Amino acid sequence: MNEWKGSGEGRFFAVVMWLVPIGAVALGMRHWLPSMVSEHGAGVDRMLHYLLVATGGLLVISHLVFGYFLWRFSASPKPTFRLPSKSSERKWSLMPIIAMLFIAEGGVLVLGLPVWAKLYGAPPPDTAVIEVTAEQFAWNVRYPGADGKFGRTSSQLITLSNPLGMDRDDSIARDDIVLTNEIIVPVNKAVQIRLRGKDVLHSFFLPHHRIKQDVVPGMTIDTWFVPTETGIFELACAELCGLGHYQMRGIVRVVSEDEYRQFFSEQPPFL
Amino acid sequence: MTVAHSGEAVHHEPQSFISKYIFSKDHKVIALQYMLTGVVVAVISGLLAMWIRLQLAWPGANYPVLEKLFPDGMGGGVMKPEFYISLVTMHGTLMVFFVISPVLLGAFGNYLIPLQIGARDMAFPFLNMLSYWVFFLATIIMLSSFFLEGGAAAAGWTSYPPLSAVKQAIPGSEMGQTFWLLAMALFIVSFTMGGLNYFATIVNMRAKGMTYMRMPMTVWSLFLATIIGLLSFPPLTAAAILLLFDRHGGTSFYLPAGLFFGNQVLPHQGGTPLLWQHLFWFLGHPEVYVLILPALGIAFDVLAPFIRKPIFGYRIVVYSFFTIGFLGMVVWGHHMFVSGMNPWLGEFFSVGTLLITIPSALIGVSLLASLWGASIRFTTPMLFALGLIAFFGLGGFGGIFLGTATSDIYLHDTYFVVGHFHFMIGGVTLLGMFAGTYYWFPKMFGRMMNETLGKIHFWSTLIPFYCVFLTQHFLGFGGMPRRYYAFNDFQYLDPIRDINVFVTICSFVLGTAQLLFLYNFFVSIIAGAKAERNPWKATTLEWTAPSPPPHGNWGAEEPVVHRWAYEYNVEGASEDFVLQTAPASKAPVTA
């Protein structure tokens, strides 16, 4: 059952193993990412491209070596080598240690950490704050209005016509503006999204802006970004939230500052 | 340091059918029980995957035949979204906990630990039996949940609350989720019994001369997997009980104040959904290593007889297993980078996670380097072991994208994750299970599996596997979210949506190819060519026992070990392999 039978199968296997990285690289060269339209998104994309090139390189090298070994050593009826010395074993082991420290830890610390630190650091002062409250299966968007303050809400006050449970007795709430499934933001200015949830987990995913942040009921989670292009972009839910998860779509309308101001001068307050 | 097993009179062979095959305390019978259960669940769970793929390629298509099978979920012949999520949830749960775990640990662990260390049975045969039957009960509970009002659990295999805690959140969160939690708790009870048994057996029952550093890699990997599992699984039992309290007792471990469902505010307050995520991933991430390590151990043991030389880096791999075991316990948070957890904690988890690439790369390089100077024999088990090396490489490189917090922002919960974990805990373990089955089948049943069918099975598994799961990585790059019933509502997915048809067709090829294995497996049990004691000319102890080994494994005399597990091509030996039981007088001891 276990006799040496020549090298045909080894060569076939070797060729398949050489085709794998070729296929992966061919796929990887295609443009998969949606267009990128935010400031920190450039950093995320740089990270992704670095990893594509670095791990793509590792994939190519390892498969070339693997295929070569299969090709060459399927042709020997008898092993030509037995045990490496302890020191050469250690020496060869040093190679992956250095490679992984450099490629993986280097990547995360040099390229990843600064982007992460900026994104999760404080936004610039006087950044506009927009509250997004997720529910099955819609995004409720609230602007603080002229006073720059959000009015009180309470889940006890929620009705079909008042999905956020805004308090009519709170004077601060009177100028708050509420939209559904639509966020309007000015271009080239930082916006802070204040995420809240009414029922289950959701995740605020802006594929074009490279933003993803889970929405957790009971918590208020802030995230911020700077949109760099005007246009209409999609908002998807990225955390399983129930049977309508796949339809929980919103849009982000990025407009010029003038249009932004004009929109809000025309928009009636919610209460 | 080894303790020879005292051959007391506990090994009377059972006589009745029931004590021999049903409530058996023989580790080999229990192993086959685990394997058979795993195969049955694998067929069911594989069919669920095909069903999922059907929906993703042609969303909303009408299948009147399937309506007859599941009138609720397929009302009018069209799949309902909530049913789709049930399928996704159950496919993941069943594959991870009720297929890979019982086959790699339950079947191979039970079969190989005593045989490879030279024991007559497990340390606690009764506990072993109990472990299987508790597992069996868990399996029945999990499978039966499909037929409950509301259907099976539908909060994903991760079962994040509040979706999994509140009945109104999704139909699967009615009794389906309760059954899911009960079955998971029982699974962990079963695993704990099995794990303690494996640990005690490896520590106490090694044959004379079987030092730790002479053990085969499979035993090492199972040893580490067991320790990791014993330390990391029990928290989920506690977590599951707390979630049951939230669901049925009105407590608020995971539920904050002000939750609003179906026009009313729920009376909960003070809990947080993040608690569950921490507890779940405290089990969930180590679970990946619990499954991957035995597959890697099996790969080394299958490799050795088919390269006809010792494997490379035995010690380094053992140390790497320990390192992975330790690091694997403290990086669960990389599943939670965007969960709302403190972002600085995220960066710590990121650095820790990427440290795991080092022992992983050492294992990968050792597998590769083992081929250097070899004389490779392309038998079916060897093909699967070689395929495993390739999958481990590709899967590992994909993991770096997800372990890096910054790139995970974009890739989290996309198809990149789906592609990645199918290569690792789907692919590496699948190929490991196949390599192990083709390799030890002659020992288990005394017959050989058909080689030609085996090789066709290998190639028709490997190639479509790449087509399905490598492609999914790139769908993830396109931003395609996972657990979506359909992708029609989003314009940014327009350019890549139809690739799902290609993926589905390939997955059908992949699924169909597994029929070759089932046919080969069951026909070979009855009609395969008779196997000798040591058909692969291997060195480890199990090959010194008859095929299949009798009750008590070794007859009158227990084996005595004189050398490590990989003495191939030793200069001065009469053959190109030396059994571990051969004394130094017969062939030089080299390691």
Image (cartoon, coloured by chain):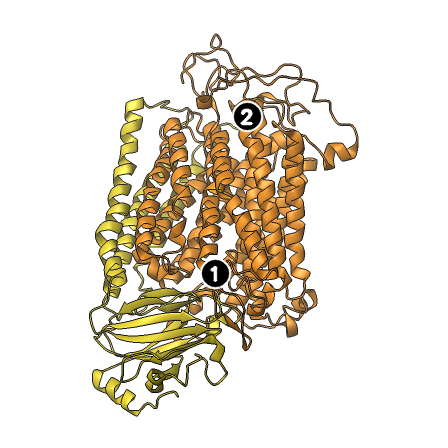
Chain colours: A yellow, B orange
Instruction: Check disc 2 and give the amino acid type.
Output: Gln
User: In x, y percent, where is residue B388?
Assistant: 45, 41
> Mark 1 belongs to which amino acid?
Gly
Q: Is residue A23 above or below residue B197?
A: below
Task: Point out which mark residue B116 bears.
Answer: 2
- Describe the element under mark 2 as helix, strand or loop: helix
Say whether residue B452 is visible. no
Residue under circle 1?
A: B271
Q: Chain of mark 2?
A: B
Name which residue lies at 65% across and 30% down: B125
Residue visible at 52% across and 56% down? B157
Relative to B506, say whether A92 is above or below.
above
Residue A219 in picture, x, y percent from top left: 40, 65
Horizontally, is A23 left or right of B437 in the view?
left
Q: Quadrant of the C terminus of chain B?
A: top left
Question: Which of labels 1 and 2 is toward the front?
Answer: 1
Q: Point out residue A47 in the picture as x, y percentages from the top left corner.
A: 26, 56
The crowding category of the residue bearing disc 2, from other C-alpha atoms within 10 Å (few below 14, some 14 to 19, many at least 20), is many
